Image (cartoon, grey):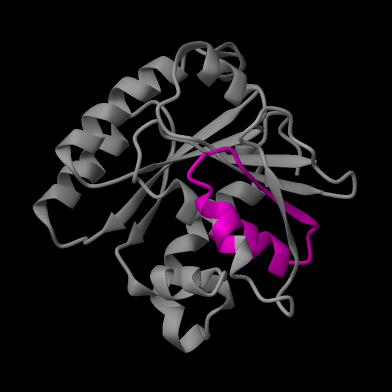
Amino acid sequence: MRTVMTLNPKGGCGKSTVATNLASFFASAGNSVALADLDTQRSSLEWLDARAEDYPAVTGVDGCNGALRVPRACDMLVLDAPAAVHGRDLAALVKKADTIIIPVLPSPMDMRACAHFITELLTVGKVSRQQTKLAVVANRVRETTLIYQSLEAFLKQLSIPFIATLRDSQNYIRAAERGLGIFELAPSLAANDLDQWKPLLRWLKSKRSRPDGSD
């Protein structure tokens, strides 16, 4: 089973948005998908509650209370991590994931918090041994702004891959209201957003995103 986690200890950076869109993408591609919500806000599980039965199935897992009860038939597990995790809690979370995606917002406060977090994350045993692979995604971006230019320069200086830039788009809100991902919206409506996901999806399919280097 492949496990992909969205992780950033700073709240409001879009972890649930990235997690739910990944779950919908993998499900639409024919995978057996479970979406585990580890955050007490339960944003991902509420997204699932809004999802109609005629869309590809995503199994919800409530992971707020400890052990994850994931169906054995599942071949893809997406983990939506809580905010404010550090120290032993962070190390325990990292053990659950093959791949971690870190969404970062274009603000000075978020960039500083991200730098401190990644410094800590790189010392976690499973990460330092390359048993969990990391990547950063710029989220809710308006590319013409000066702050985005600062964010882009900052992310390119990090010691982990900067994979994709996702724009600030109403399509994510429209999709979330219905329990959908943007991959399940009309292509004519979401074409620009779908293009922005392509680098991240290519990376997730590549050997570089997997600890064992296998496709």
Q: Is residue 94 above or below residue 87?
A: below
Q: Is residue 157 left or right of residue 137?
A: left
Q: Is residue 25 above or below residue 36?
A: below
Q: Residue 31 at what x, y percent from top left?
A: 78, 60
Q: Is residue 97 above or below residue 14?
A: above
Q: Is residue 128 left or right of residue 144?
A: right
Q: Residue 140 at what x, y percent from top left?
A: 30, 57
| Residue pictured at 34% horizontal, 46% vertical | 12
Q: Is residue 212 left or right of residue 21?
A: right
Q: Residue 39 at what x, y percent from top left?
A: 52, 39
Does 71 lie within the magenta span?
A: no
Q: Looking at the image, which residue sits at the far left?
A: 146
Which of the two residues, 38 or 30, is positioned nearer the viewer here?
A: 38
Q: Residue 34 at what x, y percent from top left?
A: 73, 51
| Residue pictured at 34% horizontal, 29% vertical | 158
Which of the two residues, 123 or 175, is positioned nearer the viewer here?
A: 175
| Residue pictured at 65% horizontal, 31% vertical | 65
Image quarter for residue 49?
bottom right
Q: Which residues are magenta?
A: 21-47
Q: Looking at the image, which residue sits at the far right?
A: 73
* Viewport quadrant of the N terminus: top right
Q: Is residue 6 above or below residue 55?
A: above
